[in-house]
Image (spheres, rainbow, N blue to C red):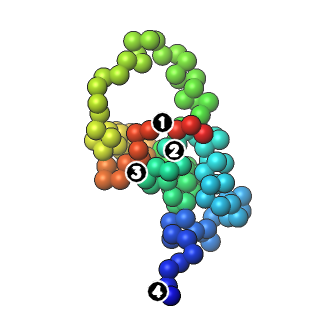
Amino acid sequence: MIGFGEEPISDRKHDNEPLETKKLGKKEFYDMVALKYYIPPYKSRGICRGYLLKVFKNEVYRVGNMELKSFEVHLEPAMNKRIGLQNNCFLVKKINQLLKSRNQNVLGFNEYDPPEEVHSSH
């Protein structure tokens, strides 16, 4: 054989992972993180074990599902109006710059590899 690994490097379990995530497969790990935090859909670009670990360890910006739902409840109808097409790459770049300026964790994605624009349905 040519020497292909059993699974992509980004999806392998890491030796430096906490015990509660070490034995989980990628899908199980995703489900555990998505239960608590709002993250892109499972099949989005960038959803790899390393990203999930960063969300789990609070090393990237994350928003709790309950916090997001609470925020959305208080939005007025006019605030939900779409403002046209936004370039996802440009949006990720702007948000990362804003977070850095506030000394907060960045999203965990860069403008060259943003997650898809499809909404997650955990």
Rendered view: 104 above or below 53: above
Q: CA distance from mark 2 to mark 3?
A: 14 Å
**Label of residue 109 in the image:** 3
Q: Earlier in the sequence, mark 1 or mark 2?
A: 2
Mark 1: few, some, or many residues within 10 Å (few <14, many ≥20)? few
Determine contact: label 1, label 4, CB under 8 Å: no
Q: Earlier in the sequence, mark 1 or mark 4?
A: 4
Q: Under tag 4, what secondary structure?
A: loop
Rendered view: 38 above or below 52: above
Q: Nearer the viewer, mark 3 or mark 1?
A: 1
Q: Under tag 1, what secondary structure?
A: loop
Q: Quadrant of the C terminus?
A: top right
Q: Nearer the viewer, mark 3 or mark 4?
A: 4
The residue that disc 2 covers is 41
The residue that disc 1 covers is 119
Disc 3 residue type (three-letter): Phe
Task: Answer whether residue 45 is visible to the viewer in this image.
Answer: yes
Rendering coords of residue 92 (x, y %): 34, 43
Q: Under tag 2, what secondary structure?
A: loop
The residue that disc 4 covers is 2
Q: Residue at left 62%, top 30%?
A: 66
